[in-house]
Image: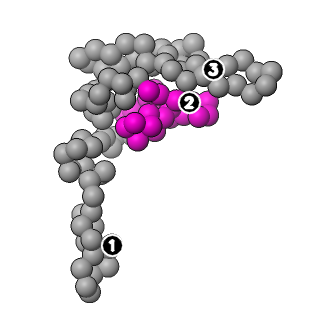
Amino acid sequence: MTTSAALGETAVAVEVTNVSKHGLWLLAADRELFLPYKQFPRFKDAPLSAVLNVEEPTPGHYHWPDLDVDLGLETIEHSERFPLTYTGSASSGSGPMAPRPAATRGQSPTSMCC
């Protein structure tokens, strides 16, 4: 859980309050948000300590530094508007976080994409 506040302001806390086989619950600004693994698969097999380590750098922006995951409130509340989901794992070598092969002579890095 992270708390922060400027001098004279009330501290705002964000915290993962529950983790189950279906997803996780995030308490932020007196609201509890459910993040199902179906829409947010990056959390499913992540270490518990990494899931619990969440920050709110700005209101409505949630960051998991150990997982390199950033989500906005709108993304959590309306995941259907953002249909792309992460399908790989950090250690699997697949998915959008997988390293890309280096360009070989005569090829530009963009020509090797996808």
* Residue 81 visible in the picture: no
Residue 28 image position (x, y, % from top left): 54, 19
Q: Earlier in the sequence, mark 2 or mark 3?
A: 3
Image: magenta residue range: 53-80
Q: Name the residue that disc number 3 marks.
A: 12
The picture quadrant where one finds residue 33 is top left
Disc 2 versus disc 3: distance between alpha carbons? Answer: 8 Å
Task: Name the residue: 48% across, 35% down.
Answer: 63
Q: Label 2 is placed on what type of residue?
A: Glu
Residue type, numbered disc 1: Thr
Q: Amino acid at mark 3?
A: Val
Image mark count:
3
Q: Give the residue pinned by disc 2.
A: 56
On the picture, is 74 further left or further right than 6? left
Q: Earlier in the sequence, mark 1 or mark 2?
A: 2
For this rendering, which residue is in front, 23 or 75?
23
Given contact means CB atoms under 8 Å apart, are the residues at marks 2 and 3 in contact? yes
Give x and y (percent) for residue 103.
27, 75
The crowd level at tag 2 (other Cα within 10 Å; few <14, some 14-19, many 20+) is: many
Is 70 included in the stretch rendered in magenta? Answer: yes
Cα–Cα span, label 3 and label 1:
42 Å
The answer to which image quadrant residue 42 occupies is top left
Image quadrant of residue 35? top left
Residue 45 percent location from the top left of the image = 24, 29
Residue at image mark 1: 110
Whichever of callouts 3 and 1 sits on the residue coming sooner in the sequence is 3
Q: Secondary structure at mark 2?
A: strand
The stretch drawn in magenta includes residue 59: yes
